[in-house]
Image: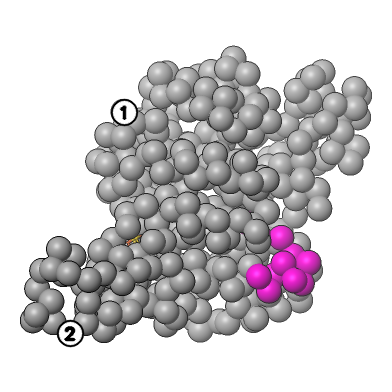
Amino acid sequence: MREAYLYKKLSGKKHAPHRDEISGAGVQCQNCAHYCVILPGKRGICGVRENVDGKLYALNYGKAIAVNIDPIEKKPFFHFLPGSYSLSIATVGCNFKCLSCQNHDISQMPQLTGKIEGQEISPEEIVKIALKNNLPSISYTYTEPTIFLEYALDTMKLAKKAGLKNNFVSNGFMTEESAKLVIPYLNANNIDIKSFSEDFYRESCGAKLQPVLNTAKLMKKSGVWVEITTLVIPTLSDSEKMFKDIATFIKEELGAETPWHISQFSGSISWKLQHLPDTPVETLEMAWKIGKETGLKYVYTGNIPGLPSEDTFCPKCQTLVIDRTNYIIHRYDKNGKCPKCSANLNLILK
Ligand code: SF4
């Protein structure tokens, strides 16, 4: 448990109407765009931050529920250290309640059971594991890194000092304060844009779209390498208009070189959408086509190994430069350039 880095103490009955009956005052968490007001003895929406006698604590600090070595393509990052492996860590908890969540056993554990499980591993130990295994990066992933910001940030600082890269796989629901805290240590961020509809974010995730778009723009503006992922859910997030809106946002606000991953949804592994079918390949292909027609240089389909739309082609002469099949990578680029026409392929190689 660690005192939260971003919160403020509140005073007055407006924020703590029952404070005469309880000890201490309310606090407001500044970590994510929910800005939870939390009374003493209570936790925020993520279930891992608790007001203890007027101070906010991250209960999940140093408690890793997952520590794995994954291909970076699994995150997915296709242009950041391609073909490398990354030490991937998470704690329990999440600030979203996505019906489609595939990691709900750990993301929703605190809210559903009150438990905050995890193996005690310090930031120093995490960095040691990465170095011992010759891994070039650490990924903060599986659940939402914003809700384990203190643990991630302390690890990121040590990792950067040791010459490692840091990346977030995030829903982007950060505040400007939390984004600015991690940006100096963050090299890459894969951000979900799950839909382009505030209704979808409210009804299917318990959140809002606009803060996600703000975070994506801030990360890009600050020099963090950004890739975007959209999980395409039949009937909920699969319209032509939505694909066009997301592709246009990426092109106009983040740049045509920003990779867009369009992933297949699988009902059987979702939290609460088992009744929905898997995304048809034709829908992903339609989204891919819309992305390309909008002018994005790198559009990829995900979760269906073997499709040519998993590969990278030179945006100028269409030469195959990276072949991918289920995390097996063959690179044909020359130090990030097309071997045929020398065009820049927007690869972060070190
Ligand atoms: S991280 Fe977000 S959800 Fe959790 S307590 Fe803070 S504002 Fe609330």
Sort mark 1 into few (<14), some (14-19) or many (20+) by Cα contacts within 10 Å.
Answer: few
Residue 174 lies, with reference to residue 116, above or below; the image says: above
Residue at x-position 85% and y-position 26%: 343
Tell whether label 1 touches label 2 (CB within 8 Å): no
Q: How many marks?
A: 2
- Of 89 and 285, nearer the camera is 89
Residue 110: where, in percent of width, then height? Answer: 31, 70
Residue 177: where, in percent of width, then height? Answer: 48, 57
Residue at x-position 65% and y-position 61%: 185
Residue 117 lies, with reference to residue 200, above or below; the image says: below
The type of residue carrying mark 2 is Ser
Closest to the camera, between mark 2 and mark 1, is: 2
- Range of magenta residues: 157-167
Q: Is residue 279 something that shows in the picture? A: yes
Secondary element at image label 2? loop
Label placed on residue 23: 2
Residue at x-position 78% and y-position 25%: 314
The reply, left or right, for residue 77 in relation to residue 332 is: left
- Of 106 and 218, nearer the camera is 218
User: Where does ligand 1 appear, by image quarter?
Assistant: bottom left
Residue behind mark 1: 235
Q: Which residue is most to the top?
A: 293
Ligand 1 under 8 Å from disc 1 Cβ? no
